[in-house]
Image (cartoon, grey):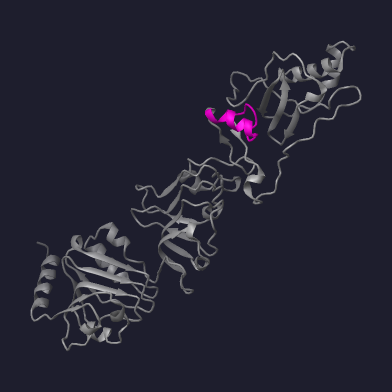
Amino acid sequence: MSAMMSISILVAILTCVGAELCQIHNANDLTNAKVCTELELYANDEVMKSPLLFDKIRMATTYRHFELNGTKLEKISEAREVLLPKGATVTILDNANLQELPKFNIVDANAIKLSVIGNPKLDTRQLLMECEKKRCSQDTLNSIQVPYSCRAIAPLPATCRIVFGTIPLHLHHYSWGTIEILYGTITLENSQLKRAPKLEMLEQVIQLKNTPVLVVKNNSKLEEIDSLLDLNYVIIDNQTGPVQIEKNPNLCIGVNHADNLFVKRYMKNVDPCIYGRKMVEVSENRKARELQEGNVEPSTGYEYETASDYEGDYENTRTTEPEPIEITSNGAPPAPPAVNFLTTEGDKNPEMTTVDQNMTRISASEVPRVESSESLVVITKTEIDGTTESVTSSTTKKQGGLKGFIEKILPKSGSEETYLFSSIFLLSIGIV
């Protein structure tokens, strides 16, 4: 038997000699003349508000059951030391003025329940060190607040800067804007939010062991969590999944955070954004239905969410109905940027779609309309023999030259229809 355990047992024996147990359930129990050395204190509202409470409990040297909730006390004991015997339960919750705890002596760390949370002026260092020394479980340690921290409640007292616990962002409250440091977890679950709310003053989130530091789950409309990616996360336990992000179908990582080390390490399962939108692959069994509804560009296998889906959150930068390509007086369309549909063996792109080379006719009214950007060209709604095609490909630097080239290899006579078809065909096979 260790010397420390022997001392604890001796203290317990000496304490029990001549001990006076007080069981305080209601205000009447505060009026008897007994001097309490052992306590069983229960959180009755009248008891917690009574001016007699401190005098009744101040000399107790053993707490068997101790609940102190929502009082105005600044301290709870004048004893040199307070024993917490096997099976003891201590709950000290939301006491705004409490500054001091007695020196606690834990007899059996495996048979004790502690919860000390939400006391913003309280220094808990001695209790934390005692609990670590006696090898309390991690769950027990996680239920003892860091010094001078508030509990995550709403509204939060205006003086709170350090919060201990879990902040549920889907229940966002304006008073959380004063939080600077969080010991615990940020969660965003089962919401209809499109953006994660920003906690204006929050700078650091410190993980509690055996708990995640960030949980983002089951948010069907969530598009971005940029406000959460700028924070400083302190990860102390990588074994229990410190970051849990899943089942957010519209969520993507913007270019501003693509190189963020936290993102690279813990958010590998979240796709990058493409032009501010997430490109969601449409399953085969949905394509036909979506195509009928006009929500999917034909044949691409991808769904592009439009600005109207975002209720004004973004400026509509996509043209729903692009203007047709202008036909010049000689019947030729202006030369578009060259599009390379052919790949070498070492440069294959599995997402590239080739044009059907069995095309037979195309009229001036059916010239493909082009939406272009710096690195993407999407040809949409091209009618080819009654079918609809869509092509997505990367652009090249090559420009123009179409008209002169066609005039060299085609007869100068011929219909406008033949001329236009030849232009599109040569583009499709990569000659021009």
Q: Is residue 42 left or right of residue 384?
A: left
* 412 to 223, vertically: above or below: above
> In percent of the image, x 83 and y 12: which residue is there?
409
Quadrant where the image shows the N terminus: bottom left
- Within the magenta stretch, is there residue 228? no
Q: Is residue 250 left or right of residue 19?
A: right
Between 346 and 334, the one nearer to me in the picture: 334
Residue 12 visible somewhere in the drawing: yes
All told, the count of numbered labels is 0
> In percent of the image, x 13 and y 81: which residue is there?
20
- Name the quadrant containing residue 209: bottom left
* 185 to 408, vertically: above or below: below
* 417 to 129, vertically: above or below: above
- Name the quadrant containing residue 14: bottom left
Magenta stretch bounds = 285-300
Residue 116, given in percent of the width and then of the height, sits at 31, 69
Residue 432 visible somewhere in the drawing: no
Q: Is residue 266 left or right of residue 333?
A: left
- Within the magenta stretch, is there residue 286? yes
Residue 228, given in percent of the width and then of the height, sits at 52, 54
Quadrant where the image shows the C terminus: top right
* 237 to 148, vertically: above or below: above
Residue 22, given in percent of the width and then of the height, sits at 17, 79
Q: Residue furthest right?
A: 329
Q: Residue furthest bottom?
A: 33
> In percent of the image, x 53 and y 62: which residue is there?
199
> In percent of the image, x 81 and y 19: which residue is there?
420
Between 345 and 222, the one nearer to me in the picture: 222
Residue 78, given in percent of the width and then of the height, sits at 24, 83
